Image (tube, helix red, strand yellow):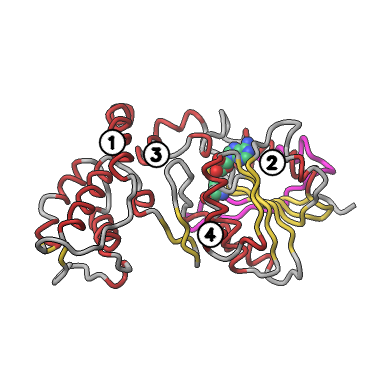
């Protein structure tokens, strides 16, 4: 089914992105007013035909965004709500984009992650709800620590680092990220949230024998976190169009077993974790036992498997590793 959908969607997505350039909702009032319920006519079916799930939620997000209102303040039945003609044009543009399966997060241009709101941008990985669980788990472990010097590998929009910084004032974070767009967005988000005094981000692609940028060659960290690309290449055919068409595949592709980038992170951790420091990873649900085996076979004395943790769907997803004490 996805193979069938992918080709036309690539065209549709280009149009959708073009249509959305300068996507702030227009609020200036002009021309006649139209009831939101009238403007909605036919759109629910169009969204369903395009394969969009949870259409009511999608429509309400878009209506709230166009009206510049918080989602929670908009009534479910849209009673009394009206668009001016500029807002109506925005509303239709955004729904067209959603029919082309552009993710809601890109249409709206921002998304809540834990207690913070992050800007999103096309091609930059959209933070997922499971990652909130991962970050909560890590925060629990570091609440009592006096000072934590943290490194994040592959920070995307900055979701993990910035929510850690927001919750724990004793944390300082340095991030590396291969995508220029993501590096710029993470920095923009840090400034927007007033966290830029404890955050640094480097545009750097971690590679074998060039794990860190020159400036960080000698650095050691108390904690390293990463949500590396971990989708097995063969699983790409099962991903939703929102992911295949609109997300950067470098943010997802973990190679044949999903651990290609994680293996680089293991090596980086051996060099840049202080003795006793921890590496926390978010991975796919088949990965924790594999990581345990890899640690036992290849990393004895360099990196120890400590534990794995389950997400809310009872999938074993999060892994804790430790560099042995000196
Ligand atoms: C799954 S996304 C996670 C993004 C973010 N941490 C989050 O949870 O929302 C993986 C990120 O790692 C980055 N990345 C992939 N390979 C990398 C590499 N070799 N070096 C640095 N960053 C990399 C991607 O560009 C992407 O932003």
Q: Which residue corresponds to mark 1? A: 15
Which residue is label 3 attached to?
246
Q: Position of residue 222 (x, y in %)?
A: 77, 57
User: Which residue is pictured at 33% across the width and 55% down the height?
Assistant: 24
User: Earlier along the polypeptide chain: callout 2 or callout 4?
Assistant: 4
Tag 2, which secondary structure?
Answer: helix
| Residue range corresponding to the magenta coloring | 290-318
Q: Which is more foreground, mark 2 or mark 4?
A: 2
* Residue pointed to by mark 4: 133
Camera-nearest label, 4 or 1 = 1
- How far apart, in angstroms, are the residues tagged by discs 3 and 4? 24 Å
Residue 33 in magenta stretch: no
Label 2 CA crowd tier, 10 Å (few <14, some 14–19, many 20+): many
- Foreground label between 2 and 1: 1
Q: Nearer the viewer, residue 304 or 55?
A: 55
Classify 221 as above or below 254. Answer: below
Q: Nearer the viewer, residue 313 or 207?
A: 207
Q: Between disc 3 and disc 4, whose residue precedes?
A: 4
Residue placed at 62% from the left, 33% from the top?
260
Q: Is residue 160 visible?
A: yes
Question: Horizontal placement of 116 versus 51: left or right?
Answer: right
In x, y percent, where is residue 67?
25, 64
């Amino acid at each position: 089914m996805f193979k069938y959908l992918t080709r036309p969607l690539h065209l549709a997505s280009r149009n959708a992105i073009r249509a959305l350039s300068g996507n702030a909702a227009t609020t200036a009032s002009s021309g006649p007013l139209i009831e939101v319920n009238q403007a909605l006519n036919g759109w629910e079916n169009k969204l369903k035909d395009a394969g969009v799930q949870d259409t009511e939620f999608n429509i309400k997000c878009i209506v709230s965004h166009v009206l510049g209102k918080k989602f929670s303040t908009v009534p479910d039945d849209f009673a009394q709500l009206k668009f001016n003609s500029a807002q109506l044009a925005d509303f239709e543009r955004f729904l067209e984009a959603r029919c082309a399966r552009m993710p809601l997060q890109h249409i709206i241009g921002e998304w809540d992650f834990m207690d913070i709101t992050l800007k999103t941008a096309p091609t930059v990985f959209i933070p997922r709800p499971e990652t909130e669980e991962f970050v909560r788990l890590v925060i629990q472990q570091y609440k009592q620590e006096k000072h934590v010097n943290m490194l994040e590998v592959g920070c995307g929009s900055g979701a993990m680092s910035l929510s850690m910084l927001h919750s724990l004032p004793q944390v300082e974070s340095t991030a590396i990220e291969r995508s220029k767009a993501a590096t710029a967005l993470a920095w923009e988000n840090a400034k927007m949230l007033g966290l830029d005094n404890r955050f640094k981000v480097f545009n750097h692609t971690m590679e074998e024998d060039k794990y860190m940028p020159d400036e960080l060659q000698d650095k050691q960290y108390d904690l390293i976190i990463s949500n590396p690309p971990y989708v097995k290449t063969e699983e790409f055919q099962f991903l939703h169009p929102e992911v295949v068409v609109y997300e950067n595949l470098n943010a997802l592709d973990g190679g044949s077993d999903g651990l290609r980038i994680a293996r680089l992170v293991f090596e980086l951790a051996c060099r840049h974790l202080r003795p006793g420091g921890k590496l926390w990873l978010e991975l796919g649900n088949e990965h924790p036992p594999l990581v345990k085996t890899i640690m036992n076979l290849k990393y004895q004395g360099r990196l120890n498997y400590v534990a794995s943790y389950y997400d809310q769907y009872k999938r074993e997803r999060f892994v804790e590793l430790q560099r042995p004490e000196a």
